Every structure is written in C-alpha cells, then in structure tokens.
C-alpha cells in the first residue's frame, strides 16, 4: 500500500529534510501534501523530481491524510495537530508542544518503539529534541545491559538547529572576519563565529536553559525512569550541521570500555567510530547528511567505580528531526 503524507512546515529546513528522507527511505507515498503558512503561498517544493505547489495550512487541509508530519513550531502544532488527528491522520510532531503530555508518546524508534501504541489516545506522537534523540540511541543498549544511575552531558550544537537565519549569520560573520570588516549579530545575543555560547533557548529560574531541561525531562519520559539523574550543559558552536555531545554516565553495574564498544557495535542506528590512535572518532562534518548516530572516545571514567565517557555525534536535522519522524511513521507498516 501507499500513504497520503502531509508535511507541515514543508518549506523549512526540517520540512525539506523530511521530503528528501521520504525519498531516500523509499517511503510508500501516494500523495505528498506540502503545507505551510500563508507566507509560502505560491511556492512549490521538489519531491521525487516533481514541483508540488505548497498548500496553505488550515484546519481542513488534512482530509484523506494518513500521516501528518509537523515541523512548524509549537504554536502551529498546538493549533493544527489536533485537527489533523481528528481528520484521521497519525500525527508525528517535531515541536516541543506535546512532548511532556502524559497522553502523548515521546518516541525514538531504536529506544522505546513500544510507546507508539499510546498514540491512540490523542492521535499524536511527539518527536524528542534532537540532542535527546542521539544521546539515548547511544545510551539505551548500556542502560538495558547494566542500568544507568546518572548522566552528565555537554552538547556542542550546530547553528542549523536554530534555522536558516543562523546559518546565514555564521557565514556572514566568517566572511566579515576574513574581509576585516566589523562583525554584527542579530540571531544570537553574541557573535557565534569563533565562539561557544552556553545558551540555547531561554533561561529558567533554576539557572538551566529550556534546551538543557528538555534533555533531563525527555530522557526520564522516554526511558520511563524517574530515578535517573541527568544534568546537561547545552552549548551553541560555530558548526553548520551535526550536534556533538560529550557524555559521562555512572552505571549501576560495572561495564568495561571494551564491553561498551562491543555492545554498541551491534546497536540499532549506531556506528562506532573509535580508533583515537588513528585519529578516528565521530565528526560533525562526517555525520552531516547521513542517518547513523556515531559513537567514539569510549573509555572508562577512572574517577568513579562504574563510569563511562562517550563522544556522540549525529546530523541534528536528520536523526535529530526528519529521519526520526519518518522512522516513527515506518513503525506503522514495517514488519
Ligand atoms: C536547537 N535543539 O538545536 C534545538 C532545536 N532544534 O536549537
């Protein structure tokens, strides 16, 4: 069978990646219905070699749709996802709108595919935040084998996570620097070129940012484990595509670096790249445009009894958003 698929936010960075990924994965699409705001009226998107006109997003734009894939911000999802579900579509939402809703499953197919069954409550499945997805793809096999008491993670997040304007700003700042002209910034509160900004999304009363607390709260929901300790520092770095993460975990039982390496070499969605003596470790520029979650720098944390350090890299627009979304939809018909 083939399915009618709506892509909400089809003209955005993640929307475009969804169209490309649907093709790369040979998703059986009967009708592709690109939906976007009034601003995109008259635009077309390229899907499988055809220019398809963008339709304006309205509450009755979902008639006959089997899967509605959203990536148009939380406000749009709150306003239109219920209507899409009411029209009978399975909704997979990339925004943060529904992630912590107890009636809406938060899913990484390699981690908690069983949670998809709960989608029947609201017809909506939430896609986790990109930095949470890649971390849990890498940690779940270890969690299942020896348990995890605590996670300490620092992220190095690409500017594409902010959107096209941030990519343009970084390019312009690098250009101005080389040209010897004054650098300016609008998208971020500080210059991003040659800098690391410990500030992604807004700050909360506890001194963390929303991005950091997403990693804490989403991890506990996805693993269905309120006992796990998570602390995060989310940093924006001058990289275009690919989030990198330095992860330290304390496991409940002892596991060696060699055992972790063996375990992850068999793990779904993971590619182990770990031969530091040969300068072989995961890199954002290698991950860009690819599907795997790459893991390397696997070593024991010698400062505690049961500690492991890992370096985890993935394309934030693909596995962090578009690919994960489509993999969730695939669960409905893959055997
Ligand atoms: C970011 N994870 O990187 C957030 C949203 N995509 O900005």
Image (cartoon, rainbow, N blue to C red):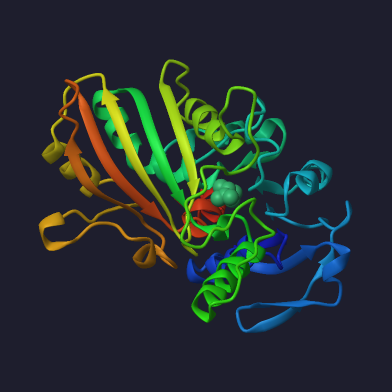
Query: Residue sitting at 44 percent across and 59 percent down?
Result: 242
On screen, residue 317 versus residue 201, left or right, reads: left
Measuring from the top left, give residue 227's x and y in whole percent: 43, 15
Measuring from the top left, give residue 166's x and y in whole percent: 62, 62
Eyeballing the image, is 128 above or below 118? below
Query: Residue sitting at 19 percent across and 31 percent down?
Result: 301
On the question of residue 19 being in view, the answer is no
Q: Residue furthest top?
A: 227
Eyeballing the image, is 139 above or below 51? above
Image quarter (top left, top right, bottom left or bottom right) of the N terminus = bottom right
How many numbered marks does the figure carry?
0
On screen, residue 115 versus residue 98, left or right, reads: left
On the question of residue 133 being in view, the answer is yes
Q: Quadrant of residue 106?
A: top right
Eyeballing the image, is 14 above or below 43? above
On screen, residue 176 versus residue 140, left or right, reads: right
Eyeballing the image, is 251 above or below 238? above
Measuring from the top left, give residue 278's x and y in whole percent: 12, 62
Q: Quadrant of residue 253?
A: top left
On screen, residue 187 versus residue 308, left or right, reads: right
Measuring from the top left, give residue 38's x and y in whole percent: 88, 65
Query: Residue sitting at 67 percent across and 68 percent down?
Result: 30
Query: Residue sitting at 56 percent across and 60 percent down?
Result: 160
């Amino acid at each position: 069978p083939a399915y009618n698929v709506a892509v909400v936010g089809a003209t955005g960075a993640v929307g475009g990646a969804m169209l490309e990924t649907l093709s790369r994965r040979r998703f059986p699409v009967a009708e592709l219905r690109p939906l976007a705001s009034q601003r995109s009226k008259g635009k077309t998107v390229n899907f499988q070699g055809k220019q398809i006109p963008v339709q304006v997003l309205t509450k009755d734009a979902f008639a006959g749709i089997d899967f509605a894939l959203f990536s148009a911000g939380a406000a749009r999802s709150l306003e239109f996802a219920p209507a899409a579900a009411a029209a009978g579509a399975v909704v997979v939402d990339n925004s943060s709108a529904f992630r912590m809703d107890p009636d809406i499953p938060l899913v990484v197919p390699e981690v908690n595919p069983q949670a998809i069954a709960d989608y029947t409550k609201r017809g909506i499945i939430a896609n986790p935040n990109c930095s949470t997805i890649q971390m849990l793809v890498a940690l779940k096999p270890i969690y299942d084998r020896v348990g995890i008491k605590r996670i300490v993670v620092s992220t190095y997040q690409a500017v594409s996570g902010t959107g096209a304007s941030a990519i343009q700003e970084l390019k312009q700042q690098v250009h101005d620097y080389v040209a010897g002209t004054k650098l300016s910034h609008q998208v971020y509160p500080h210059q991003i070129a040659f800098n690391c900004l410990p500030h992604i999304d807004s700050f909360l009363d506890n001194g963390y940012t929303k991005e950091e607390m997403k990693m804490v709260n989403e991890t506990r929901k996805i693993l269905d484990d309120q006992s796990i300790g998570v602390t995060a520092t989310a940093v924006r770095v001058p990289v275009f595509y690919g989030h990198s993460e330095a992860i330290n975990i304390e496991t409940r039982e002892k596991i060696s670096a060699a055992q972790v390496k063996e375990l992850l070499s068999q793990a779904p969605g993971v590619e182990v790249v770990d031969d530091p003596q040969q300068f072989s470790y995961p890199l954002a520029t290698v991950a860009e445009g690819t599907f795997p979650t790459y893991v390397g720098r696997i070593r024991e944390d010698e400062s505690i009894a049961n500690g492991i350090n890992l370096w985890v890299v993935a394309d934030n627009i693909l596995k962090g958003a578009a690919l994960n979304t489509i993999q969730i939809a695939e669960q409905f018909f893959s055997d």
